[in-house]
Image (spheres, rainbow, N blue to C red):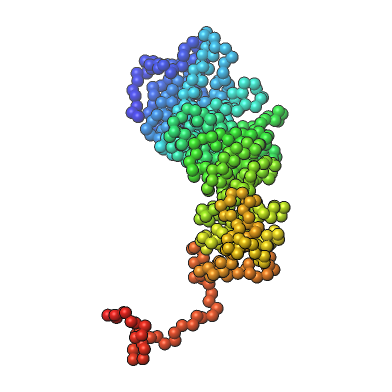
Amino acid sequence: MPSVEVDKKKRPRTTKDSVPKKKRITEPQSSKISALPEPTPESIIELEQQISSSTEYYNNLVYLNEYLDSEDSQVALLAATALFRSFARMLAAGLLSKPKSQSAGNAQETLTLWLRDRYQHFKRKLVSLLNSENAESALTSLTILVRLMKEESIHLAPTKGEYYFAKALFKRILHALLIQSDDELLLEFVEKYANKYDDLRYYFFHFSGLLANDAMADQSESHKTAFTTNLLSALYSIDNLPTEDAHLNEFWVELPEKNKQPVAKLSAQKAAFQDSWLAVLRLPLTGDQYKYILQIMHRKIVPHMNKPQTLMDFLTDSYDAGGATSLLALNALFSLMQMYNLDYPNFYTKLYALLDRNVMHVKYRSRFFRLLDLFLSSTHLPALLVASFIKRLSRLAISAPPSAIVIIIPFVYNLLKRHNTCNVLLQRVDTTDAEEDHRDPFVADETDPMKSGALDSSLWELATLQSHYHPNVAMLAKIISEPFHKPSYNIEDFMDHSYNTMLDAEFTKTIRNQPVIEYELPRTLFESGHEGDQAYLEGWDLC
């Protein structure tokens, strides 16, 4: 910015933002305010020093605020830093505290109101700079705003000595971060502050829930999408969650020794966490977001909620949705049923319905079988129920890919070892009329596992797999024809197989015995000169 020449004998023109003139005791002497200097590091430092030296130079706040709009990012950053230091000193001196009354003739109160107005202008500008394309400007603005939040919390408390947190400023900062086009600055805030300070994490959960409710009511679909994406990114990144009161010991704003605040109570932290996530679940989620939330719910959400039972409706709807969504809802739903004694009517009937051909091909197949193994682990389950699961799995193995079959066979073997009553499925001596007609008593399309007739059937499907084209499958299937002396299989050894892993195993397998091959290489495709050598070539003309 070019320098401006001013006649030193003339008083500079007072702008609408200039300090109001009431009494000499509180207003700066305008005659001592220099013309707006060229924005250099030296001039900015000089303006700041003048502000700290006398009230006569408070109009320098106006000049520094103007520098925030400079196209030179370094000038803007220096001005922001100078303003921060100036306002921090004023906060500490009580100059920005809200006056008890606003008397028209009180010059001190008039000055305070003017300073508070300049301060509000400064904060608005910093909030707008959070969306700057210049990463350094945005990050510096965030740092200053968070530090101002701390200064306000210390010096603007309505009652001296009582705990106070600058909630209004925090909410403005968080809202500005959540509506940005990307989440880079938001994740920076989470990493540096929310993950480190217990009070900032608490207020992040508290206000993100409120802002999520506001987003549902006020914002357009595009804003909702950006807001939801950013908020989920932040929630996924917050991993330093407390599990007991003793873990709450790091605060951005110091707490008083007496009167324990909610931010220092685990129950309050969990309540804020719960409110935030419940608000998120009401937002318009994409399919991928919905599925990922279900994936992490039993590990990262349910354990940190005050009342996980509030998720029951969400999980029930997800479980009833069918397909991959139902598979992903299983874990969290079963956790609630197990830990909080909640009831889901016909749980095993719904679980039985999930066993179809599609489950053999989804990417969550291994996850589903781990859960299925958990759900069927109880030895108190009815034999009819377990037999239905064994039979349906065996039927699915007929058309399943080899990578799925190698899970099913040891899985069924373990169920038979665990539930001896179902061993009748292996060898059935007596025959019924249905069996004489070569009909399987098992009703494959029956939705109720207690009525499928599985216990009257046999595992002919697994016997059929002994002739499977894949040698590993055929060899594994022979286990049902041998005495059950082998301990239960470790299902994890078979979970993550695919065509690639099975091919790699074949390629890297050590060959113990060399295969027999022709020891003399033939010179021609068909030998000639021998009697009858053309007998098998009738109807063919070799060119």
Q: Based on the displayed image, in which of its 4 quarters is residue 248 positioned?
A: top right
431, above or below 140, in the image: below
Question: Can you give x and y, in whole percent of width and height, for residue 10 in the image?
Answer: 37, 15
- Residue 89 showing in the rendered view: no
The answer to which of 325 and 233 lies nearer the viewer is 325
493, above or below 59, in the image: below
Residue extending furthest left? 543
Report the number of numbered marks.
Answer: 0
The answer to which of 509 and 402 lies nearer the viewer is 402
The answer to which of 407 and 114 lies nearer the viewer is 407
Q: Residue at x 33, y 28 (%)?
A: 2
Question: Can you give x and y, in whole percent of width and height, for residue 279 in the image?
Answer: 56, 34
Q: Residue at x 54, y 70 (%)?
A: 467
Q: Quadrant of the C terminus?
A: bottom left
Q: Quadrant of the N terminus?
A: top left
Q: Based on the displayed image, in which of its 4 quarters is residue 157 positioned?
A: top right
Q: Residue at x 66, y 36 (%)?
A: 306
Residue extending furthest top? 105
Q: Residue at x 55, y 58 (%)?
A: 396
Question: Can you give x and y, in whole percent of width and height, for residue 40 in the image?
Answer: 40, 32
Q: Based on the displayed image, in which of its 4 quarters is residue 253 positioned?
A: top right
- Residue 302 showing in the rendered view: yes
Question: Can you give x and y, in whole percent of width and height, for residue 250 in the image?
Answer: 64, 38
Query: Position of 453 compared to 39: left or right?
Result: right
The answer to which of 377 and 266 lies nearer the viewer is 377
434, above or below 169, in the image: below
